[in-house]
Image: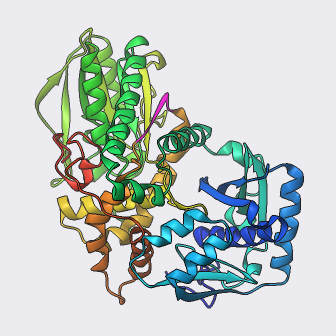
Amino acid sequence: MKKNASFGIDETGKIDSKVYLRTAVLVLMKAVNDLYGKEVMVNVEFKYGGAYYIKLGGIEATADVIKVISGKMRESVDAALPITRKKVSTKEAIETALSKNDFREAELLSYRISNETEIYCIGDYSTMFIGELFDSADKIRDFKLIRSEKGLLITGESLRFVEENDIKALSRKLFELQNVTEKWADYIGIDSVPDLNRAIADGTINDVVLMQEAFYEKKMGDAAHEIVYNKKKFVLLAGPSSSGKTTTSYRLAIQLRALGREPLIISADDYFFGIDKRPLLPDGTPDLESIRAVDTELFNSDMIKLLNGEEIELPTFNFKKSQREYHGKKISLGERTVLIIEGIHCLNPEFSVKIPDESKFFVYISALTPLCIDDHNPMATSDCRLLRRIIRDNRTRGYSAEDTLSKWSDVRKGETENIFPYQDNADYIFNSALVYELAVLKLFAAPLLFGIGEASPQYGEARRLLRCLELVLPMSTEIIPKTSVIREFIGGSCIDVT
């Protein structure tokens, strides 16, 4: 995508939301520092729709406080204060962080190998950011602060998130899951990259891995118990790219077997239409992301036959020939059978419209990382999934990191249209993000990202991801169980994840 003279705004005038939000956070941090000094910290918890969810350490984010802070930010915006980036010695960057009581950033920087660190400056305030910012505060002229939960949301009208009522349009279940995940991460003492680095350096990472896997397995058991208790026959499971759907399906099946059920896993992809009946994109290529690409009529007919005690022959979709085939795989629903159906449209009511509600249990898998880089640099959930996909695409399909990055915007578009609108239909939500996974992903993703040259359109994005990874210490993969969801991407799983 071509950029004009103002970084973060393309030639059509569309704003990069990440650049906007980072800039808004810097202006917010300056305002808070001007008003309250170093006693109040700005903690960016996570991205929530077109906003960052933020907590203020040391002061309650009341409506009056937010109004005062917003007014102070407006001063910087109206004055069009320039934002500059400069290189300083890492030692100086650490000293600057300590002078602001930003101990987490200071510790993070202490793990840097490089003697230099880039920081952003606005007025007399400076700090480190991962990723680009605008060059002037007036580029966020339409910013807005909204009180939410125990903190606030920072966003902008140009990001289409401008009214408090818009919060209701976002996933409350995902918001709650993120909070639960962060509380758990805080409880075990690993909610930031410095915490993770410390655990790796002092040798306690093995316990962290075991606790994480135990927590994940408990959630599996809870879901399986709920499915059995409510006598559900169909588990419909969906999630965005690289969220770990295959591993989760298998481990859920194991939990159901432990409770005396006989689970069967099928893929909704096997109900794809052949190439002659697929919907087409404007450029004439098949639209595999649309629910219209799935023969929902046949799927529902087969499922109703199963409910009625009949036997059906399951189709298999041959992707090489782009056609549905039958190879004699017949199934029926016994008294203890539970069918686990995995596919991107499984939470869309249209997909299973004829199956009685009392027979269905909807599961959504996300990868909401609880790990932040430091207090004001969150680790985007989509970045963790992107790193997973880069590694898996290269390992299983031979794709380069450049190939995966070039397709990522289309993948995200498909998720936005076909998956995210239905996530609140879920009866149960799994979080497949692991607090330790960045240290593992670094081992496999960094070499692939370094292979992208400056001439590539994906070079800037590759460097941004590398700037995140360079702050993380690597860890051995030997201590990771073969059942772990991360094995679906790095290899070594005892589960068939092909």
Asked if residue 134 lies in the magenta stretch, the reply is: no
Q: Is residue 379 above or below residue 461?
A: above
The single residue placed furthest to the left in the displayed view is 328
Residue pictured at 70% horizontal, 46% vertical:
167
In the image, 66: left or right of 333? right
Q: Quadrant of residue 49?
A: bottom right
The single residue placed furthest to the top in the displayed view is 335
Q: Is residue 292 above or below residue 474?
A: above
Whole-percent x and y of residue 11? 59, 84
Of residue 302 and residue 163, the one placed in the foreground of this image is: 163
Whole-percent x and y of residue 462? 39, 76
Whole-percent x and y of residue 26? 68, 72
Residue pictured at 36% horizontal, 47% vertical:
293
In the image, 35: left or right of 231? right
Q: Is residue 111 above or below residue 426?
A: below
Residue pictured at 31% horizontal, 52% vertical:
203
In the image, 496: left or right of 19? left
In the image, 375: left or right of 489? right
Type of colouring: rainbow
Whole-percent x and y of residue 126? 66, 79
Of residue 69 and residue 472, the one placed in the foreground of this image is: 472
Magenta: main secondary structure equals strand
Residue 280 in sight: no
Residue pictured at 55% horizontal, 85% vertical:
3
Of residue 3 and residue 149, the one placed in the foreground of this image is: 149
For the record, the magenta segment spans: 426-431
Residue 495 in sight: yes
